[in-house]
Image (spheres, rainbow, N blue to C red):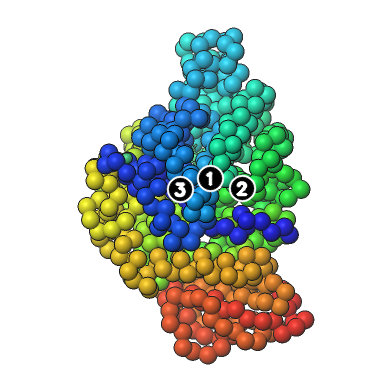
Amino acid sequence: MKKTWWKESVVYQIYPRSFKDGNGDGSGDLRGIAAKLDYLQWLGVDVLWLCPIFQSPNDDNGYDISDYRAIMAEFGTMADFDELLAQAHRRGLKILLDLVVNHSSDEHAWFVESRKSRDNPYRDFYIWKEGKNGQEPNNWGSAFGGSAWQYDPATAMYYLHCFSKKQPDLNWDNPAVRREVQDIVRWWLDKGVDGFRMDVINLISKDPRFPDGPVAPGKLYADCSLALNGPRVHEYLRELHQNVLSKYDIMTVGETGGVTPAIARDYVAENRAELNMLFHFEHMDLDKDRERLAQKPFRLTELKRILSTWQKDLGDDGWNSLYWNNHDQPRVVSRFGNDQEYWEKSAKMLATCLYLQRGTPYIYQGEEIGMTNMAFETIADYRDIGVLHAYQEEVVQKGRDCQEFLRYQRHFSRDNARTPMQWDDSANAGFSGGTPWIKVNPNYRRINVSAQMTDRESILHYYRRLIKTRKENEVILYGSYDLILADSEEIYAYIRALDKQGLLVVCNFTAQTPLFELPEHIRYSAGQLLIGNYTVTDGPMARFSLRPYECRAYLFSFTEEIYRLK
Ligand code: TEU
Ligand code: CA
């Protein structure tokens, strides 16, 4: 396996609108980010991924881009960006941008032209179809609800939008579109950015027959995700890699829903020359019944099965990304942890469990201080287009119980991740001197960076230690991974191995006190505690009882030849 900087890096994801407001207008911005670079450097992360910062009418908070070479007015100017990039580089921090090219904004000049006439030179930049018997061209639905087709009276045809109707899908089958995307990517790389996170990148190639899809019970439309991993997606990614990406020393991570380890290999295996790694969603639906908008019980054995399969299957060829959180997901401590009595212990345990696996860790802003879900009270508190659309459809149109709907959103809404970063206990958590665009979580007086900075036992200091520990131990970066005690519903335990060096990670996902026993076939010597979230005084690593949400990682040596894990 090749060693590279991006396999040894830790990525920190920033949602610019909610990170730090530099000018008091209530929205985070680029100057705000620049003001926090010292903090990020102190934390020890290497790469900053910025969610979209490009010009946008913000129908979907920047995931609808109207000019790929301009900065969103609320976030600042191109001069601010250049300054941020220079300041980051000076500190050894790299910057990843969010490339959103499955679709653009309907306000992008291409689309403004495209919709003018059937023979406009930009017509084929988007996907236009005739209606079928006065209906939409097929039964595909948008991710935010309703049909994925919008009728446009100017030319009496429909255009495809897998997300909102202000996010028309680009037509990648048109070589001119692919050339434009390549130019954009080259333009930013020449400016010095260090790579891209690529939004829904496996959605770019649609089946040219546009077939109807299966419709789930109680739904009107087929899920647009049926168009994922389309017929020419690999051809297009390779072309992008060959013509542009391969010429730079950068990193790429694709956001790819609907991907299993087997499918993933075709995107990230080294000889494929497509992407470095990707984000799959298999562990994000464990506790969520999307169809019925309900919570479902979470089983630890399922989580272990999924994460371990990814660890094994992308073992020697390809690379994993490790994430619990992003701007689309609820806060992990409220989800797989315990944000009440064991808030601090469970936040540290979750970090340990994931970030000692093989792959590149992604930390989402606020995760490092254990930020929690937000109990928004009314629909008026929500900002996410996804929630607002679902409210219209479910509550207003279908008459679903409003309280039940809100209960679901309190668990799963994307706005849980988007409340402002909690810097200190001053007004608005030190995020902004103005009125924040979305409510601040009232728990900021207790949970904030400043308080945790001064407390060496805090979640924040623990994250910093964990990041440092990763870098100091090759076995964490490049060692193999083997799950042990696969059947336990309480303990997540695994072994990493590199030559004779071993690492044992044991995590208790419950408030109970289960007993851990190392399987007998693992022979070792000199077990030594590397990191953990409780003080440890008891003896050997082979047998101990765990306290609520306790985690421990031990370094050890295999006594030769014995290392044969089942
Ligand atoms: O998300 C794509 C995506 O698959 C989401 O619909 C995801 O499944 C959902 O948010 C989970 O709740 C990307 C971006 O991350 C998201 O913020 C954008 O809204 C979307 O693409 C459109 O660009
Ligand atoms: Ca601002």
Which of the two residues, 23 or 259, is positioned nearer the viewer here?
A: 23
Q: Which residue is mark 3?
A: 87
- Residue 527, percent from left and from top: 60, 84
Are the residues tagged 2 and 3 within 8 Å (C-beta)?
Answer: no
Question: Is the CB of mark 3 within 8 Å of ligand 2?
Answer: no
Going by the numbered disc 1, the residue's amino acid type is Leu
Q: Is residue 5 left or right of residue 151?
A: right
Whole-number angstrom distance, CA of label 1 to CA of label 3: 14 Å
Q: Residue at x 46, y 48 (%)?
A: 87
How busy is the neighbourhood of tag 1: few (under 14 within 10 Å), some, or many (20 plus)? many
Going by the numbered disc 3, the residue's amino acid type is Gln
Sequence-first disc among 1 and 3: 3
Sequence-first disc among 2 and 1: 1
Q: Residue at x 65, y 87 (%)?
A: 525
Q: Is residue 200 left or right of residue 449?
A: right
Question: Is the CB of mark 2 within 8 Å of ligand 1?
Answer: no
Whole-number angstrom distance, CA of label 2 to CA of label 1: 8 Å
Q: Quadrant of residue 318?
A: bottom right
SS class, disc 1: strand
Quadrant where the C terminus lies? bottom right
SS class, disc 2: strand
Are the residues tagged 2 and 1 within 8 Å (C-beta)?
Answer: yes
Q: Which residue is mark 2?
A: 251
- Residue 515, percent from left and from top: 51, 82
Q: Residue at x 69, y 59 (%)?
A: 3
Sequence-first disc among 2 and 3: 3
- Ligand 2 is found in the corner quadrant, namely top left
How busy is the neighbourhood of tag 3: few (under 14 within 10 Å), some, or many (20 plus)? some
Q: Which residue is mark 1?
A: 96
- Residue 483, percent from left and from top: 63, 70
Q: Quadrant of residue 132?
A: top right
